[in-house]
Image (spheres, grey):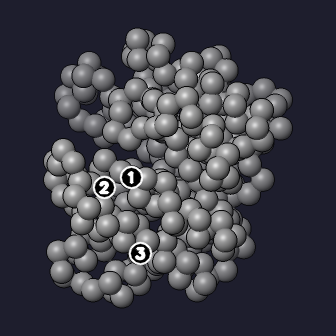
């Protein structure tokens, strides 16, 4: 049966390309020192997560992390020992078309690390026909493999505007998000299903209007076998105020939690990196930020 049995309060910090660019700018190759800095910062985020879990009770959802093995292998191993639920990304970072980070060896990596959930990030739009012809079969391969090998699959779906969309909305992304993206999201989900892509969990960009949620939910759960499919919303690196406004609009009883990362950890890490705060302060701020969103969702 498709779906995941628990609601998720997911702290994602599997960012790789964007993480590097934020800290060091455009670099062709990381130095050993830079790699160590990224590893240390990701470890700090994990420590903050553990602190938050220790400080609060999670009665309505499961606290979980999403981290890459490229910079967070030791974190994944520690999470397994501590029985912390974790998700493993399988996509190659920074790509416009979905590709496996480990090529045909993706299954071996999943089997080795044994994540609770496998995660795939994909950018899709009905107008991107050539791109979809390439990436949908790859995602279908992943979906089939996960079902055959008893791994739950989360698909993180981003529906970015095309240049034509931006032109139509006079380069106003918010207008696109409000007026067109919900309809496109439904179309993309249907296309994924038709291509044999069957996630247990959809991680979807939040919607601006409550009236747009029912059709998205209906498309994700269309058919008898998909009735228990989970849907969580993502934060897209927005401000706390914006994320909370999305929480207010979302039909929480019909959704299954959230995945918010940069909103939680980015400012404390930038301040730590620039020397404005120390490690202990950054740790506390990240933990408090995560708990603030958990409490706001649960209220």
Query: Going 47% across and 43% down the picture, which residue do you hit?
Result: 205
Q: CA distance from mark 2 to mark 1?
A: 6 Å
Judged from the image, the secondary structure of the residue bearing numbered disc 2 is: helix
* Circle 3 residue: 44
Disc on the earlier residue, 3 or 1: 1
* Circle 1 residue: 15
* Circle 2 residue: 19
Badges 2 and 1: C-beta atoms under 8 Å apart?
yes
- On the picture, is 18 further left or further right than 247? left
Residue 110 screen position, x and y as percent? 63, 45
Query: Going 35% across and 55% down the picture, which residue do you hit?
Result: 237
- On the picture, is 100 further left or further right than 160? right
- Tell me, yes or no, if residue 297 can be seen here: no
Judged from the image, the secondary structure of the residue bearing numbered disc 3 is: helix
Q: Image quarter for residue 286?
A: bottom left
Q: Residues within 10 Å of mark 1 (few under 14, many from 20)?
A: some
Badges 3 and 1: C-beta atoms under 8 Å apart?
no
Q: CA distance from mark 2 to mark 3?
A: 14 Å
Q: Which mark is residue 256?
A: none
Residue 292 screen position, x and y as percent? 48, 75
Judged from the image, the secondary structure of the residue bearing numbered disc 1 is: loop
Residue 109 lies, with reference to residue 136, above or below; the image says below
């Amino acid at each position: 049966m498709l779906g995941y049995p628990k609601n998720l309060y997911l702290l994602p910090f599997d960012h790789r390309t964007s993480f590097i660019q934020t800290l060091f700018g455009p670099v062709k190759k990381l130095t050993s020192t830079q790699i160590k800095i990224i590893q240390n910062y990701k470890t700090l985020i994990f420590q903050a997560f553990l602190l938050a879990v220790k400080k609060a009770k999670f009665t309505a959802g499961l606290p979980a992390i999403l981290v890459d093995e490229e910079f967070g292998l030791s974190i994944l191993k520690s999470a397994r020992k501590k029985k912390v639920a974790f998700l493993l990304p399988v996509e190659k970072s920074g790509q416009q078309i979905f590709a496996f980070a480990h090529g045909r060896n993706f299954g071996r990596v999943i089997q080795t690390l044994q994540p609770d959930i496998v995660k795939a990030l994909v950018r899709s739009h009905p107008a991107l026909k050539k791109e979809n012809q390439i990436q949908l079969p790859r995602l279908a391969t992943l979906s089939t493999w996960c079902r055959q090998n008893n791994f739950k699959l989360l698909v993180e779906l981003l529906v970015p505007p095309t240049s034509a969309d931006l032109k139509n909305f006079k380069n106003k992304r918010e207008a696109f998000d409000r007026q067109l993206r919900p309809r496109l999201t439904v179309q993309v989900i249907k296309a994924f299903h038709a291509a044999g892509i069957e996630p247990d969990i959809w991680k979807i960009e939040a919607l601006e209007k409550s009236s747009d949620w029912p059709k998205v939910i209906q498309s994700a759960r269309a058919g008898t076998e998909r009735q228990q499919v989970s849907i969580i919303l993502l934060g897209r690196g927005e401000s706390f105020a914006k994320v909370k406004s999305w929480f207010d609009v979302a039909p929480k009883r019909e959704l299954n939690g959230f995945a918010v990362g940069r909103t939680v950890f980015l400012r404390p890490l930038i301040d730590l990196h620039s020397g404005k705060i120390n490690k202990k302060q950054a740790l506390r701020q990240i933990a408090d930020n995560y708990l603030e969103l958990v409490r706001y969702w649960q209220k």
